[in-house]
Amino acid sequence: MTNGTNERIEKLIGDAERACARSFADLEKIEETNTRRILDAFRTHSVALRHFSPTNGYGYDDIGRDNLERIFADLFHTESAIVRPHIVSGTAALSLCLFGLLRPGDHLLSVSGTPYDTLQTVIGTAGDGVGSLKEMKVRYSQAELGRDGGPDLKAIAAAICPDTRVVMIQRSRGYAWRPTLSPDEIGRAAELIHRINKNIIVLVDNCYGEFTDIHEPTHFGADVCAGSLIKNPGGGLAPTGGYICGRKDLIDRISCRLTAPGIGREEGSYAGSYRPFYQGLFMAPHTVCQALKTAVLAAAVFSSLGMETSPKAGEKRYDIIQAIKLGSPEKLIAFCGGVQAASPVDADCVPEPWDMPGYEDRVIMAAGTFVAGASIELSADGPMREPYTVYLQGALTYAHGRLALKEILRKMLENGLIR
Ligand SMILES: *Cc1c(COP(=O)(O)O)cnc(C)c1O
């Protein structure tokens, strides 16, 4: 690498970083507010060393588990919560909610368009339908988001029918080019839905959204929200797990599916320590802030190179995903190669596009994480199709995110992909 390349990279990043100062300051304020909220909850619930102890067997009176659930409920302003290592992923948390709340003959309505890929086999709109809601005679339909990218209140009102039992809203853009929904936008939709029928349950897929704002959707009237502990709320430390926060009667129903009717939340041990869940939650506002700063910097750098980004560098964020239209397969491969080469784990792997089951186009993915598949850690992926959009998320530290961006730029400059 020439000195010129190095200087060029330093200048690109330095200039972008200076332009981000205001956004960074705003993000650090959110971090402080959320850290205070969490600290308050830890003090209210007298967190002590004994809460970190492992348990085994049935797990009756597991104080570490029960206290963690009370803390989550407090933070999300809900009556109750389920926070468990046994919930294997975000999809599993959402699937538990759906199977816990829906009964044969009920109608499930998604009001943020097509749900996240992995939920489609749960609903039964993809795959062979075995074990799906469809097989359980739950009817499904969806309302698309409005032209402004927000919930389309007219379309929602028109799609609700007497059998509608659960309305599902996905906060994050996921892997789509659309704005993320803010907690209060979700709240406005929830208010309308409850005005039409107060018995309808508003369920939020909160994955990737936690602690990006000082509010969560349940602060504004969503009935239940769920997500993964190896994304935002695990702070990069939780080794596995999922959470569900919501109204007590609904959490009670869901907990019948978690274990068994009559047992609910009373059972469930964990032979590892609960410390990483508590410490991860405590770290989460900071980790999320580091991921957001990395995303803002990436948006600033690549928009300075003429590429379109969503969100834009200075835009308010409600999830940790940064989408960038790179414009060519070579750039997408170089981008993912840069992320992988700059990873603390598996840095010697070279990501390649592959035919992933369930996807129409080949997909390329880069991740070298301490917790397998944890996307609060730095990772990037994208489908091999026009306009070659990469989705970047995570970074446990901003310094790591910044170094990875340098690596990406180096690969692009050396291969003549940017000038
Ligand atoms: C990650 C994610 C999921 C699924 O979570 P997994 O842990 O990958 O199963 C669902 N919805 C959204 C919006 C997500 O980002």
Image (cartoon, rainbow, N blue to C red):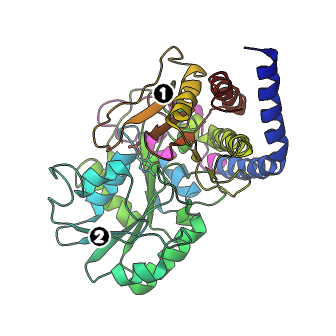
Picture quarter with the C terminus:
top right
Q: Looking at the image, which residue is at 83% across and 31% down? A: 11
State the residue at coordinates (15%, 49%): 128
Q: Is mark 2 on a helix, strand or loop?
A: strand
Can you identify the residue that label 2 sits on? 141
- Asked whether, in this view, residue 258 is left or right of residue 48, the answer is left
Q: Nearer the viewer, residue 188 or 48?
A: 188
Judging by the rendered image, the residue that carries numbered circle 1 is 371
Question: Disc 2, ligand 1: is the CB inside 8 Å?
Answer: no
Q: How many angstroms separate mark 2 from mark 1 (CA)? A: 35 Å
In front of the other: 260 or 309: 309
Could you tell me the amino acid type at mark 2? Ser
Q: Is mark 1 on a helix, strand or loop?
A: loop
In this picture, residue 250 sits left or right of residue 400: left
Residue 9: quarter of image: top right
Dot 1 crowding, Cα within 10 Å, few <14, some 14–19, many 20+: some
Q: Earlier in the sequence, mark 2 or mark 1?
A: 2
Chain part drawn in magenta: 41-68
Res 115 → quadrant: bottom left
**Whether residue 177 is situated above or below residue 305 in the rendered picture:** below
